[in-house]
Amino acid sequence: MIAALREFTDRALGRGEAAITVPPFDGALKPNQLLEEAAVVAELDAPEDLATDGRSLFVSDGSRLLRLDGSQLHEAERLDRIITALACRSDGGFAIALEGKEVRIRGGKDDGKRWQEAAGQPFCAINALAVTPNGKLIATDGSARHSYNEWSHDLMSLGCTGRLLEIDPVSGARSVIADGLGYAFGACSAGDEIWVCESWRHRLVRYGGSGSGSVLDRLPGYPSRIAPAADGGFWLSVFAARTQLVEFVLRETAYRKRMMAEVEPQYWIAPTLSSGRTFLEPMQGAHIKTMGILKPWAPPRSYGLVIRLSSEGLPRYSLHSRVDGKNHGVVAAVECGGSLFVLAKGSRRLLRLPIADIERSLLP
């Protein structure tokens, strides 16, 4: 009764969960152009994820697994379906998710093992994998209702069916660490805890250790994969920025349902991985452009963002590709050989930034 009354008053007054305010890019999230100015290592066909074993960088590009040798990408393996998530194992093998519906081991002592469900529920949208210090796999299943490529459908449906899973490759046991998540997208080990990104709730959450709770919340964007940094802390990728317009649409049920029923998904008022390619996009006019020039402070339909977190999960600094840039839709960022490699899915580019140069530019 109290919860229902609170929800009613929040909607009437536009506060709490009904508020459409968006946190600003400020402090450690102050905008810059570092992602836009990054070196382009390669332009890919259908990039999805990055992984590293500490020596080499691996990229999933459609059904191909690519390895970076120097400045060139070479095909290491080709599979029968699209690789939607990738992780390197300590025995030289890989954990791979195929079309979000299967987790498979390639190479190493557990080669050939595969799983398609956990706790009796089939995988639907496996979008990230990680390996724990004891060799187990962590997987995030974004949604139980919408497939890997239908993430915007899940957002517009107010989805909250994501799961955080643990897989033991030795015994084959699968367990559900957490469910009911607002699109689980990315997880990693942090000491005796597991941190998972909840995209639609704009936060990073911890499980295990002393319990569960929020590590970082009220993000100005939708977080995705998270990877460890070499000197402690983490690299958090953010695949799109939040806007007041999208927040408003999410709270207008009748409008949102009609939009989903009558408009093609690429033209929805919803986050996207790239923008500016067609005049049919929903955000047009002088609030976006003046004299044909796109304003860098305009509301972002797509954006590029990586956040460097401390070991406690606090933002230290960030790397941006702003509204007028191209390197948007950042879905992965990993550190290898003293450089940060960033996958901008919106522009289908693999980017490289020397970490020493990043910190020289951003830190006092």
Image: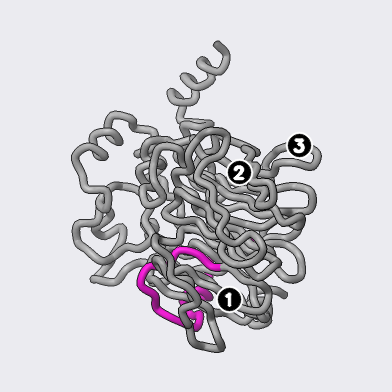
Mark nearer the N terminus (3 vs 1): 1
Rendering coords of residue 81 (x, y %): 39, 60
Seen at 45% across and 48% down, the residue is 101
- Figure quadrant of the N terminus: top right
Check residue 49 for magenta coloring: yes
Tell me which residue sits at (59%, 46%) in the image. Answer: 203
Which is more foreground, mark 2 or mark 3?
A: 2
First along the sequence among labels 2 and 3 = 2
Three-letter amino acid code of the residue under disc 1: Leu
Does any portion of residue 21 appear in the rendered image? no
- Residue 165's tag is 2
Q: Mark 1 points at which residue?
A: 57
Measured in 3D between alpha carbons, the distance from the residue under mark 1 to the one under mark 2, in whole angstroms, is 25 Å
Give me the C-alpha separation between circle 3 and circle 1: 34 Å
Give the extent of the magenta segment. 27-50
Q: In this view, does 129 lie above or below 249?
A: below
